[in-house]
Structures are given as C-alpha cells and as structure tokens.
C-alpha cells in the first residue's frame, strides 16, 4: 500500500515538472525579446506562428480567424503577402480566396508569430 501511494505521489510530482519548466522557459524567452520584429525568428507564445488573423475595427480587442483564409499560404494579394512576410501585419481587405479586397472595407491582418512577438515585448516592458 505504501509503495502504491509513493508511486502515485511520484507520478503527480513528475507530471507537474514539465509544465513548470515550460512556463519558465516561455517567460524567460519573452523577457529577452528586444528590438524590432524579425520574421526569421519564431517567437514563443500561445499563437500558432503561421496562423493569419484579422480584426475589422482598430477598437476591436480580439483577433479572429477565417477558416478559409487562416494561413499566409492562402494569401495571393501581393501587397498583403509582402507586408505580412516582412512586418507580420498588413492593413487592407482580403477576399476569402486570398486576393486583394475592396479598399472601402479595410481590416487589420496579423500573423500569429507577430502576435507572439508583441505579447513578449509587452511582458518584457513590465
């Protein structure tokens, strides 16, 4: 009985260690982010680096995904592609097929990697 309790306790303790290490690694990585956004670096964070998200209004607080247009690979609009590859963000409208959309309906687009970078910068400035 004592052996079973010991093994159960050991299992519980061991299962917590990787989580603590991962959290510590993420916090340390976030604290070391300095300088401008670099698309060649994969920044640690909660967002999938290749994901493409948007918001319709600058006042909107949440980024949304469109399943049909959820990665940079689906973007065919040259201006958007160039900006997203260099800056990780773009302001304009994209059609669901990834082509350039109407200039009368601007939206903000961002890559998950850029969001991870921005959150890491905010954490390092605290």
Image: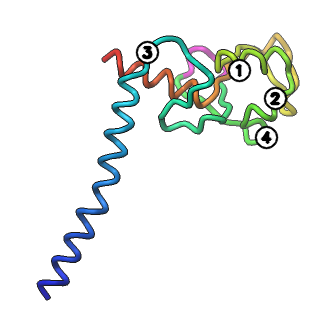
Q: Earlier in the sequence, mark 2 or mark 4?
A: 4
The picture places residue 121, in percent across and down from the top left corner, at 43, 19
Residue 83 sits in quarter: top right
Q: Is residue 27 left or right of residue 4?
A: right
Instruction: Identify residue for label 1.
Output: 84
Nearer the observer, 104 or 51: 51
Q: Nearer the viewer, mark 1 or mark 3?
A: 3
Above or below, comparing residue 126 to residue 76 in the picture: above
Q: Position of residue 89 (x, y in %)?
A: 66, 18
Of pointers 2 and 1, the one earlier in the residue sequence: 2
Cβ atoms under marks 2 and 1 closer than 8 Å: yes
Say few, some or many: other residues with alpha carbon within 10 Å of mark 3 (under 14 / 14 to 19 / 20 or more).
few
Write down the region rendered in magenta: 55-60
For the residues bearing labels 2 and 3, Cβ distance under 8 angstroms:
no
Disc 2 secondary structure class: loop
Between 60 and 78, the one lying in front of the other is 78
User: What kind of element bears circle 3?
Assistant: loop
Label 4, label 1: how far apart the Cα atoms are? 17 Å
Q: Is residue 123 above or below residue 91?
A: below
Rendering coords of residue 34 (x, y %): 43, 15
Which of the numbered marks, if any, corresponds to residue 75? 2
């Amino acid at each position: 009985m004592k052996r079973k309790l010991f093994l159960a306790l050991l299992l519980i303790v061991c299962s917590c260690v990787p989580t603590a290490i991962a959290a510590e690694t993420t916090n340390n990585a976030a604290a070391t982010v300095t300088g401008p956004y670099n698309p060649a670096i994969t920044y640690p964070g909660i967002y999938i680096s290749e994901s493409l998200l948007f918001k319709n209004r600058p006042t909107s607080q949440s980024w949304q995904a469109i399943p049909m247009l959820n990665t940079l690979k689906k973007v065919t609009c040259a201006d958007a592609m160039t900006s997203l590859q260099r800056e990780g963000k773009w302001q304009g409208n994209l059609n669901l097929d990834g082509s350039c959309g109407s200039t009368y309906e601007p939206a903000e687009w961002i890559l998950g990697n850029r969001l991870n970078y921005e959150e890491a910068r905010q954490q390092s400035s605290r």
